[in-house]
Image: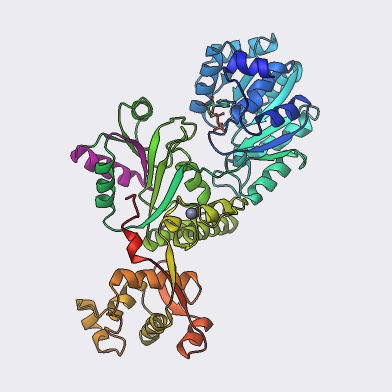
Amino acid sequence: MHQTLQKYFGYSCFRPLQEDIIKDVLEGRDTFVLMPTGGGKSLCYQLPALLLDGLTVVVSPLISLMKDQVDSLQASGINAACLNSTLNYTESRNIYRDVENNEIKILYMAPERLTMSHTTSLLEKVKVSLFAIDESHCISEWGHDFRPEYRKLSFLKRKFPEVPVIALTATATPKVREDTISQLRIKEGNTYVASFNRKNLVYRIRPKKETYNQILQYLRKHRGESGIIYCQSRRNVDNIAARLRKDHFNALPYHAGLSDSQRETNQERFIKDDVDIIVATVAFGMGIDKSNVRFVIHHDLPKNLEGYYQETGRGGRDGLECECTLFFSRGDRYKIEYFIKQKGKKEERDIALKQLQDMVAFCESTICRRKVLLGYFGEILEDDNCGKCDVCLQPRQKIDGTDEAKLLINCIDELGQRYGMNHVIDVLCGSNAKKIRDKKHNKLKSYGTGDIHTRDRWLEIAREMIQQNLIKVEGARYPLLKLNRTSMDIMVGKRTVTLTTIEAANVTDAEGL
Ligand code: ADP
Ligand code: ZN
């Protein structure tokens, strides 16, 4: 094992778990590997492929990913090939022939190719020693990246019961993990879960306000550094990339609306450090191995924590620090919620809504971000202070917020629970806006009672109260602030409220954006 590692891959030692996994695979056991991106999953099937007698078939969802892997294997003198839709008839026929003649050790293909009858009959003719299913979470509807063509892979254990399977993924909540294992009929015993803690990533959540300016300020302090700015829409990508160029930053866009060649060029230039910043939709990044990404900015709210973890995971591959900043607004949340409610089956909607809820809870959390994030993946972080997230970097104070809570609750009540957060807080802060005067809300008793705090502070208070379930939000398109039982208890003095605040003295210590 060590010799092969040295000879073909040029590494002197294994990364955590690699050796155990490879031993299991060599002994013919089915294995499930959950390892963060960059953890070194490929080696777990590539090395056994070389030691096992016969062919290793690798299932991978993306053509570009397969090509990269095959190129680098070939460069190391390993007989690898891939079957995909970009090959013409002759090219595919040649590969089929080479496989039949046992001239290929590792064969990559997309799942739909593996389920075709002429592929399975070919594989029945030769000796297959291992099936490796990369990105195996795609088999589960509970994952963020469900691909129906992966579903069919459950036929493998039926058709080739004696061939071991290794399934690998970088994203799986406990639920997705169970689902994947059972779909592929892998025995539970051989599951390897590496820690997902990326200690060199700094997580920060910022209010989504004057976002472009905040980004600009950050970039000015970090000129020449390499980074990714993720946006939800192509339009945002194009806008921001164009604005950054106008502001003399070296930035290029990346999204599915660009031509293949344009996308490839932009990605290539980013990887080669020819351009510093790539502004992209989530279409960017799968399989990208760029070591020196120093910041990952989420301009918009991601749809789920798996996606967020993956995207931020593209930073700091070299082990050096990477700043991950997400701009959060409830507005984004309702936008996504609205889109989710337009689509598909009820079960899909429910899954997506639950995932979004977890994403929002992460953003609004007043406990360590890392703890919440890892907790989502079923990993428990013992330490209460990671020292590398905005929550831990800015010590918070617990203060009595009963008076504030009462003011807000009274105001919501007086407004008949028929208004959103912004309007309620405008009333509370005594705003002179026309819509307030038109509705005669400046005549309410609550009007202006909140002028002890800034509007921003009130927004914070309201959010924390929602998070603590002291008030609630209802309505998807027009989210309204509403009261619940706890609000009543607070109003009548049966309950006190504790809020958290950042200690003023420490605010200036907070680096980042
Ligand atoms: P993953 O598929 O888990 O995202 P990769 O298999 O692409 O990760 O590996 C990530 C990087 O780590 C690659 O550049 C790979 O060459 C490198 N790598 C993998 N295993 C080792 C090892 N044992 N020693 C040093 N580098 C390794
Ligand atoms: Zn922390």
**Would residue 246 be counted in the magenta stretch?**
yes
Q: Residue at x 28, y 72 (%)?
A: 454
Residue at (60, 54) in percent of width and height: 382
Residue 115 visible in the current orientation: no
Q: Which residues fall within the magenta stretch? A: 224-248
Which residue is farthest right? 162
Q: Is residue 69 left or right of residue 438?
A: right
Q: Nearer the viewer, residue 448 or 61?
A: 448
| 497 relative to 71, above or below | below
| Residue 420 location, quadrant | bottom left
Q: Quadrant of residue 398?
A: bottom left
Q: Quadrant of ligand 1?
A: top right
Residue 371 vs 451, above or below: the answer is above
Instruction: Find residue 253 and report its horizontal and vertical position in percent.
Output: 32, 37
Q: Position of residue 473 (x, y in %)?
A: 45, 72
Residue 178 falls left or right of residue 460 = right
Residue 365: horizontal and vertical position, in percent?
Answer: 48, 62
- What residue is rendered at 50% in x and 72% in y? 468
Q: Position of residue 141 (x, y in %)?
A: 61, 48
Q: Is residue 262 left or right of residue 95?
A: left
Q: Residue at x 60, y 23 (%)?
A: 108
